[in-house]
Image (cartoon, grey):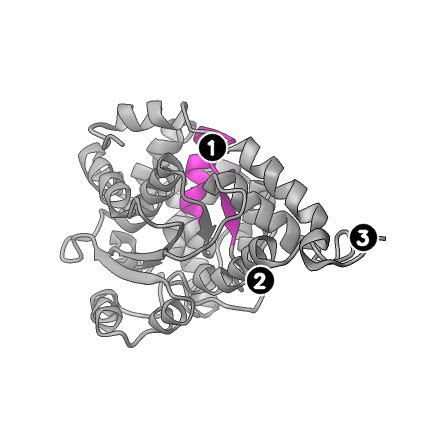
Amino acid sequence: MRDISSVAEFRDLMSNLPAADDSAGQAATDRNAQLTKPPGALGDLEDLAIWYARWSGQARPRIEAPQVVIFAGNHGVAAAGVSAFPPEVTQQMVYNFQAGGAAINQISKTFGAKMTVVALELDRPTQDFTKGPAMTEAELLTALQTGWQSVDPQADLFVAGEMGIGNTTPAAAIAAALLGGAVQDWVGRGTGVDDAGLAKKCAVVEAGLARHADGLHDPLFVLQALGGREIAAMAGSIAAARAHGIPVLLDGFICSAAALVLHAMNPAALDHTQAGHKSAEGAHARLLEHLGKTPLLSLGLRLGEGSGGALAIGVLKGAVACLSGMATFAEAGVSDA
């Protein structure tokens, strides 16, 4: 699979996406109808397993090599006081990921996922998007390429996570730019800002939208002007997974904002994804509704790191194991009434 050499090439790839394997999906559907259970008894797990079969191209699939990648970036708008934590925490958490001490390390290990962290120029934050575009086009391309290249072609499931102090602010700005509505509908408390911090976040997002109003019709410009390197890298990785034929579990609000950019470019761009969970960030449920995604889990998580997406690996593994491992009525010698 070729790499992306320009933003224009990325646009072209997003308009020519590979489709699912409908023959594998039909074979999985036929097998599911013969398993030793009443029809529909496994509820949403049945549809989930068939979805995985279609996008993995396997009628009787297995999940043996899930991959989790955490992208880390720093943001110029963090200097405006939009987070309860200082920007240095981004690098400190990257060290924690590398040492195996974070929640995502434990969850990835539990479900047999290979986890890596990719830091994107942490010593050089994006520009404050109230003063100019967060990234140049060249910086956007580099971030997209970083995400694209991070996907292991041998993986059979992909989860993108993030770390970046202040990044709920650009995520909210992206959602507001692409979906409209009141800024207050998209801005939340993130890592726990107080009322004054929440008002500051709203003001920052409003200023960013006003600053870049002329270009907000273009999803990639929205990502360049209002996003961050780790958000762009997540978008690149989700697109690369599609190109490789690898199903994806989306994480929380920030990952979903990255995915929203792809969806705005091509409404079919996220058909190979499922929402791993609904986070406690207030606007996440609204964003998932727009994307047409029903979350697999809703546990009040608001950690980021890919934690909710990685936790949903267990649900998907269970669904796929039932489809592929259960006996049919004929195999088990059970009467199919």
Task: In the displayed orientation, state which residue is furthest to the right.
Answer: 337
Q: Is residue 274 magenta?
A: yes
Does residue 182 appear in the picture of this structure? no
Q: Is residue 187 above or below residue 104?
A: above
Closer mark to the observer between disc 3 and disc 2: 3
Out of 154 and 71, give the one closest to the viewer: 154
Q: Give the amino acid at mark 1.
A: Ala
| Residue 207, picture quadrant | top left
For the residues labelled 1 and 2, the Cα–Cα distance comes to 25 Å
Left or right: residue 124 versus residue 39 is left
x, y (%) of residue 15?
41, 23
Q: Is residue 230 above or below residue 165?
A: above
Tell me which residue sits at (42%, 28%) in the image: 17
**Are the residues at dot 3 and dot 2 in contact (C-beta closer than 8 Å)?**
no
| Residue 219, picture quadrant | top left
Left or right: residue 232 versus residue 251 is left
Q: Which residue is mark 3?
A: 336
**Are the residues at dot 1 and dot 2 in contact (C-beta closer than 8 Å)?**
no
Task: In the displayed orientation, state which residue is furthest to the front.
Answer: 333
x, y (%) of residue 85?
31, 70
**First to last magenta residue range:** 256-275
Could you classify mark 2 by the number of other residues whose Cα lies within 10 Å: few (under 14), some (14-19), or many (20 or more)? some
Mark on residue 264?
A: 1
N-terminal-most mark, 3 or 2: 2
| Residue 243, picture quadrant | top left
N-terminal-most mark, 1 or 2: 1
Out of 46 and 76, give the one closest to the viewer: 46
Does residue 264 appear in the picture of this structure? yes
Out of 173 and 210, give the one closest to the viewer: 173
Q: Which residue is mark 2?
A: 297
